[in-house]
Amino acid sequence: MRMIDIIEKKRDGQALTTDEIQFVVAGYTSGDIPDYQVSALLMAIYFQGMTEQERADLTLSMVESGDQIDLSAIEGIKVDKHSTGGVGDTTTLILGPLVAAIDVPVAKMSGRGLGHTGGTIDKLEAVPGFHVELTSDEFTKLVNEIKVAVMGQSGNLTPADKKLYALRDVTATVNSIPLIASSIMSKKIAAGADAIVLDVKTGAGAFMKDEKQARELAEAMVRIGNNVGRKTMAVISDMSQPLGFAIGNALEVKEAIDTLKGEGPEDLTELCLELGSYMVYLSEKASSLEEARQKLEHAIDNGKALERFKEFLAGQGGDESVVDNPSKLPQAEHRIELPAENAGTVSEIVADNVGTAAMWLGAGRATKDSQIDLAVGLMLDKKVGDKVEKGESLVTIYANDLSQVEKVKETLLESIKITTQKVTVPTLIVGTVT
Ligand code: URA
Ligand code: CA
């Protein structure tokens, strides 16, 4: 097989065979095929697209390029949830204990990564004592007993995706639906879940700003999952404004506790119930989505979800008393309200700019060596559609480093728009793909 023939075939709009795709992925991972030829192929894919079969083949080839996590020692149908990324997205912290409370096993491998706030692990480390350094036996035992555990990423998962993603980044080929869909799904499949629930975000704070593209990506990923034997469903949700009120690590842990108590923000609660219903249904703990949702609501009402969160924290060395006493979480030294300059109705809260402001305060990493301040961040006092008086607080800034606060205030005032006209509140659940 010759790489030049494969490039030519794709350039001319023909579909590649399973063997050809495996040849490319294996050859690129080992270093036998050079960057320049793979670059040309990626650009051809960008313009010509990929068939459903090619997408499944590419995904599986990337899965097979490295280690795969074996979760077979864990009882039950393991369902993973993946979000394409947003601002102040606290859903994972809530969904873990929530679905675990009705015996859906959640075996979560998580990372730290870059972004507006830390990743799931950083957030959980706001709980004193909590750690993710578990042996695989400890991890299995915890998931079998408590039904939820989080472990740091280990092993060499999907090295082909790492290399291809880096090459796409410098060849203007990131933004291709088949390539994005295969990239995300390869990582989920290598992580070992039997079934996958996807939360595809759309709007200013999302990777897919536009709704049509978000739907296309959701459909592409659901097809790949189902075609390679992992039941997959997707929810498309709004990320034009941040989710919930909290953007920051300890602040989001507090928000998760509130939500598990049934006292959380309306949008965050709704999205967790929606995603959770799919997880419960795919794990076969309910025979319909309606029944799944009732079970979740019940677990919040009767305190089981909150109880499970305590057990989860304690299982990994965390101080579970933070749940009843959240003032034990890291606290910022300064709380600064940001008063509205005009009266009216909030018409827009540009999610990505607000996320960047939280990062400047120290809530997230700008580079991989940045130090996170778990205590800092933002609490929205208003959401889109809320009325506001002049001088009323729009958002409260939780800061330790005052040197960033002026810049943060300026950005927030530009990003939170107020109008005297009628405002339509964005729909939270834009669509689903099943
Ligand atoms: N996120 C991924 O993991 N892969 C892509 O290709 C794009 C976004
Ligand atoms: Ca939030």
Image (spheres, rainbow, N blue to C red):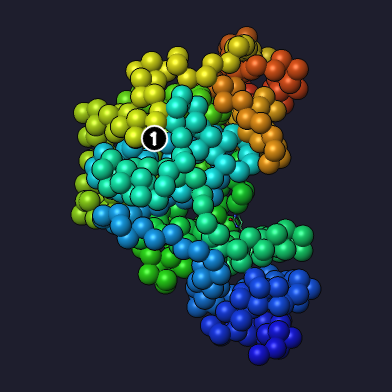
Which quadrant of the rendered structure holds the N terminus? Answer: bottom right
Q: In the rendered view, would you say 149 is above or below 335?
A: below
From the viewer's perspective, is 306 left or right of 215? left
For this view, does 434 lie left or right of residue 162?
left
Q: From what the image shows, is residue 371 above or below residue 140?
A: above
The image shows residue 250 at horizontal and vertical percentages of: 51, 25
| Residue 9 drawn at (x, y percent) | 68, 86
Residue drawn at x 77%, y 63% as measured from the top left: 171
Q: What residue is shown at x 21% (from left), y 46% (from top)?
A: 291
Decide if residue 259 is on the left or right side of residue 378. left
| Rendered location of residue 247, percent (x, y) | 55, 29
Q: Is residue 22 above or below residue 305?
A: below
Question: Toward which corner of the image does residue 158 lie, by quadrant?
Answer: bottom right
| Disc 1: CA contacts within 10 A as few (<14), some (14-19) or many (>=20) | many
Residue 324 visible (yes or no): yes
State the residue at coordinates (63%, 60%).
162
Which of the 4 quarters of the picture holds residue 183? bottom right
Q: Is residue 44 left or right of residue 61?
A: right
Q: How many marks?
A: 1
Inspect the image, locate mark 1, and give the three-letter code of the amino acid beneath it: Gln
Of the pair 90 and 309, the residue shown nearer to us: 309
Residue at 34% in and 35% down: 315
Residue tagged 1: 316
The reply to whether residue 425 is in sight is no
Identify the image quadrant of the C terminus: bottom left
